Amino acid sequence: MPPLASVCLGGILASLILAGTGCNPAKKPLPGPPPAPEAERAPAPKPDEGKAMTPAPAAPPTPPTAPAAPAYPTAESLLNALVAKLRAADLPGFFALAGSGVSPAEQRKINTLLGERKFQPSATKPPAEAAPGSYTVFLDSPADLAAAGPQSLKLTFSNDPVKGWAVASVSAPAIEVILAAKTAAEKKPEPAPAPTPPPPPTPAPVAKGPVDFARDFLNAVVARDFRSAKLAVDAKKLTDEKLAALFIVVEEGAFKPHDRNPLIGTAAGTDSAWVIARLKSEKQESDFGMEMKLSGEGASAAWKVVGLNFSKLIQTAAAQAGAGDIAYAPIKTDLQDGDQLVLYFDYDNASVNPRAAKQLRIIADILRDDPKKMIHINGHADALGTADYNEALSDSRAAAVRQILLAHGIPAGQVVTKAFGFSAPKAPNVNPDGTDNPTGRAQNRRAEVYLAF
């Protein structure tokens, strides 16, 4: 049996844990588990452990933080900030503001231009908006690079609804071009070549006479080139209606310049002349007269057509086509209304006859040449029938003319119509003795065309 002291010392730890007493030699200690390693022993309870804990009050909720205002709420504010950096020669600050919008290659060019070469934002020319979100910053060149001319930076901005405006791209001019201009300016000028002797004087051109200008006019009429023909006339003395009527007669009669002496000058003076144009068709020959005046002085002097007489040509065209019961006189001159182109109709009929259709095709060509030209069509009737019936008939005639012009591609806004019934005859409807005048009534069944050019 081991000594009592040994038992007491060996079982003291177990006795303290299980019984909370010291060693009792009268009692044999109960066996217990081996002591836990030092690292696994539970920490001694704190004085307050085992007591009921009062929960701490909950912290109040944190209010939401307002979003930060955009750094640059407008494109102008960002532009002003960038320009201010350039004026202060703060290129690092400029690049920091531009961020990823300026590429390394553009940074190198800007460093060369505004750092080494001393370009500056223009003192007299403020930045300009080239397009929405795109700006041009003009630069003043230093004295040694003035030969390179004005330069500029191109800035493009983008806008984010939350972050505000930012730089999207920066473009600087090519430094190679600027330096090349400087090199070229620094080169010494080459000696001027020896002067070459002046060429022999060129003989003065022979001045064109009235027949030469008349030939140009005649060729334009035959070719139905209204614009060139109008350039050859004095617009103050020769109306567009009369010029268009000449086009109509030459076209309808299929006339061409005569192959023998197509132009004959008569009564030529220093500033006026009369030229006869001889024409022929497959069936007949005819002619018309051109009154001409010299306008201008010196090299700018030119002959102009100021008057036309082609009544013989009208008679020839009417005879070879056969007028029948429909009157034929494509131009009428009235002291009050001036010149009018005239289209005639059958009795009690609003259909456009083939002859009038030819005339309208030429008028359409003239109108198509200039969309600003306007045409006014006045419909008329003879005196047989009631006033209401003839007013409706005259309106139908004007509308028929208008419809053909529209079919030739003339916009509706260029054509204006008006109906007069029998209220404005051009010839008597009855003879002096009161009998019917069929010839006069045929001239009243018409549509008059006014070209408001």
Image (cartoon, rainbow, N blue to C red):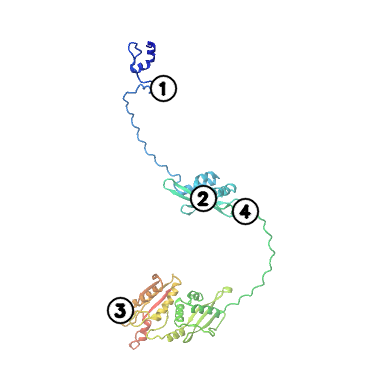
Give the number of the mark in front: 2 or 3.
Answer: 2
The residue singled out by tag 1 in the image is 38
Relative image position of residue 414 (x, y in whole percent): 40, 71
The amino acid beneath tag 4 is Lys
The residue singled out by tag 2 in the image is 170
The amino acid beneath tag 2 is Val
Tell me if I can see residue 336 in this picture. Answer: no
Relative image position of residue 34 (x, y in whole percent): 37, 20
Which part of the image, by quadrant, shows the N terminus?
A: top left
**CA distance separating discs 4 and 1:** 88 Å
Secondary structure at numbered mark 3: helix
Closer to the N terminus: mark 2 or mark 3? 2
The residue singled out by tag 4 in the image is 182
Closer to the N terminus: mark 3 or mark 4? 4
Relative image position of residue 214 (x, y in whole percent): 53, 79
The residue singled out by tag 3 in the image is 389
Q: How crowded is mark 1: few (under 14 residues within 10 Å), some or many (20 or more)?
A: few
Q: Which of 236 and 375 is in front in this view?
A: 375
Give the number of the mark in front: 3 or 1.
Answer: 1
- The quadrant holding residue 314 is bottom left
Relative image position of residue 94 (x, y in whole percent): 52, 45
Q: Which of 305 and 175 is in front in this view?
A: 175
Give the number of the mark in front: 2 or 4.
Answer: 2
Tell me if I can see residue 166 in this picture. Answer: yes
**CA distance separating discs 1 and 2:** 71 Å
**CA distance separating discs 3 and 4:** 87 Å
Give the number of the mark in front: 1 or 2.
Answer: 1
Q: Which of 270 and 80 is in front in this view?
A: 80
322 w.r.t. 303: above or below: below
Which part of the image, by quadrant, shows the C terminus?
A: bottom left
